Each structure stands twice: as structure tokens, then as C-alpha cells.
Image (spheres, rainbow, N blue to C red):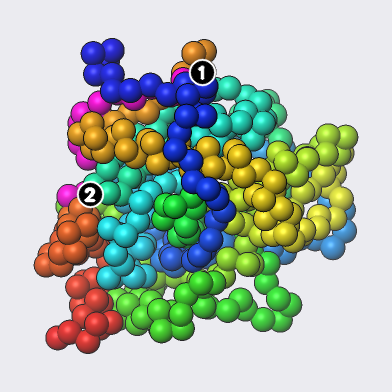
Amino acid sequence: MANNLIAEISRLGLKDLNSPASASITDVQHLASYNWIEAPRATPTIAVPGSPDLWSPPNGPFRLGKDTGHIYIAQNAARHPDSPLEPLFRALYVSHPSFDIASIDVVTDRNNIRKLLGIVNPRWSSYKREDFTIHVEVTNNTAIFCREETKTEEYIGPNEFRGYGHSFEKKCTSRQVSGSTGHHRIISYRFGGLKFIVRHETDGYVGVAGTQPSLQPAGTQASEVDDLSSVLDSLSLSPESSNPGKTYPAGFKLVIRKEGQAVPLPSTLEVKTRVAHRPLAFEDVVSQLWVSQTPKLVRAYHTKGVFAVPKVEDVAVQVKAWEDQNQKDLRMLAGLIGKIRDIVRESGGRAILKYDANRDKLVFHKLGGKQMLPKGLYAKWEGRGSDEQGIGLDVKIVGQSIEEAESAVSGKT
């Protein structure tokens, strides 16, 4: 691969990047969401808009068994290895059929930004220097970052100990979507002169006693919510009509069904568990909260598996204070992301980005093989409709075609 080398960036070289004068997150909007649904691997299935699990902890202390069994490390890649980013775009275009993807500079998972921030300052990755890989593709002026993991899922044996995180979430949250195995949210914001779309997994949400959360996502207009409802309703989707055991024609790579409700961003939370004698410092989790703009945090502590009553902390003000206090690192992060886009765009539009921890360098190589997304999705960058509107051809909508749904929204016949 050495002869395919494009560029290298060392940690010392970061100081020479063209960084913006300010690097604060602004204009945050919830765009879309979905849940992965337990289904045969041959028919990967998502529910749109889906829902996070509802925070519903016990009223007193409780004992849990340790985590065991199957867990996901990167569920999108595990369930849809052909195109881990495809569900992001499908959910986005179901919710916003006319979304202008060409206006976006970077599309990425939260995980990628956290890894790049860890290069800027190892403090934000618990001082761990580990190799990682990100595939980068630039279409027009939009850089798409796709994480690559050595393992996307694993099995925790009965004699292994990996903590209580998954057991805790099962005990303290209640599932809102039948068969759900994880909720993913898609938000947009401006940061360092660039416009981002960021996908991230959400552990849960806080409801108000006796009520349901507003169906209107934070940052959207009421008319947009009405449009989403119209799209989904016209699809005539329902949990009953989407049998996880049912098979679909081989040409359909992804199944979409209607279920759930759009939960506003201010209700969402991140859950962390720790042994009581090792309290979790806020700085150990703040970068994760910042990237996804998650406003609530649960730090749950246990002694030999016995948990005290967990509390929800509203940390939005603390996250903003951290952002203000770490502008040097964040400006450097913004400069690095912009530089990555520039390097890949000017080198053919596709590259594999590897961080070499031993050399403390980011190394770019040309990337061959197939493109990240199904062919039809690329038409969206050209503003084209026809049969390749971004939700056709190789996706199965349970009910009407998405073209009919888009017509219902736009008034076309």
C-alpha cells in the first residue's frame, strides 16, 4: 500500500493547520432517527422514526447480574456491512425527501469525531493512543466519513466480566419500539465554518410523568413534522405489516417500517456505569456529549453489582462551558477535519485514513473498491429525482413506494 500513499499529518503538524477563529457548535437541528430491528441478516430492517428507550429506573437500590451474551460494537456495520451509512441517508430522506445534501460539508458518525479529537489532545480519549481507520469519500464538496472497526459485534461469555452497562440499561429503561436493538439519531449543526450531519446512538430519553414527549423535534418547524407524518402515514407502514421473519426479494437490501415517535433532543440522555470507588469524571465523558449535543447524563455507581438509585443530571451548561474553555483544541479539530476533506477531494475523492499510534501520525492512502453508498443515493448531490431519489431501487418500504409518499408531501400527482 506504500505506493498508494497520498499524505501524512503528524501531531506536530496540527499546529500549522488553517484553524477557524471560533469553533463552537451552533444551529443544532434534529433531522431524523431510526431503530435497528431484530430481523434475519438477509433482510436488515429499520424503524423510522423509531424511539430511544424511556428512562424508567427502579425507586430504590437494586442488584444486577453482569453483562453476558451478544453485544454490538458498531451495529450499523454489523447489520448492514455493505453500506453502514445507508440507513442514515434512508432515514434522512424519508423524513426530508427534498433535503439538500450538497449543502453539507461533512457526514459522519460521532465516533469518528471523537477519535480525531483524541489526536488533537489525548486527554479527550483518556490518554489512550490506539490505531484506528476511517474511510473517507468526497462527493462534490461533501466528505463522508465511515468508521471501520476490527470487530463490529462480540459475545461475552459467562466467565468473562465486562461490567454492567447493558444489564443496567435493560433494567432502567423500557423499550418503545418492538424488537429494537438500538436507536440512532441524525442531527445537523455548524462547527468551525463547516456544516455537519452527525449520527450517534442514544441510550434513552426522559419523559414527563403522565405525558408523552412532544412529537416535534428540536430545531424543526411544525410544517416539517407534519410532512414527516404525511410521508410515513402515506406509506401505510405498521409493525403488524412488517413481519421480521418475512423475506423480501433479493434486490431489496434494506427494509424500512413505520414505528415510534420523534423524541426532541433536549430529552435525550447518555448512560454510564462505574464501580462506586472509581467515580466517573465529567471530563472523561464530556467530548462524547459535546459531539452529539446530548444534554443529559446518568452516572450510575455500584458496589459488587448493587446500584444506588441513579439520577439524571442536566449537563448542557457544563458541556457549553467545556466548549468555551477548550477552544484551542476545538479550533485545531475543525482545521483537521477541513484538511482531511481537502486532501481526499484533491486526491481522487476516495481514501483510507489510518492513525498510526506508534508513529503518532495520520496516514492517507488511495482507496479502491466499491463506493460507500448505493448508486441511487449519489443522485441526491445533483438534485436529481426520477427513480433514484435516494429511497428507491434497493430499499424495501413496507407499503406504498416512497415516490408516492414524496408526491403526497409535495402535492405532485
Q: Which residue is mark 1?
A: 360
Residue 140, disc: 2
> How far apart in space, not on screen, are marks 1 and 2 (Cα)?
30 Å
Residue 156 lies, with reference to residue 204, above or below; the image says above
Give the residue drawn at x 34%, y 34%: 135
Q: Tell me if residue 370 can be seen.
A: yes
Give the residue drawn at x 52%, y 78%: 216
| Local secondary structure at mark 1 | loop
| Local secondary structure at mark 2 | loop
Residue furthest out toward the left: 386
The magenta stretch is: 360-375
| Residue 286 percent coordinates (x, y) | 67, 46
Q: Nearer the viewer, residue 325 or 43?
A: 325
| Residue 177 percent coordinates (x, y) | 51, 65
Q: Quadrant of the C terminus?
A: bottom left
Is residue 372 part of the magenta span, yes or no?
yes
Residue 227, disc: none
Residue 238 lies, with reference to residue 20, above or below; the image says below
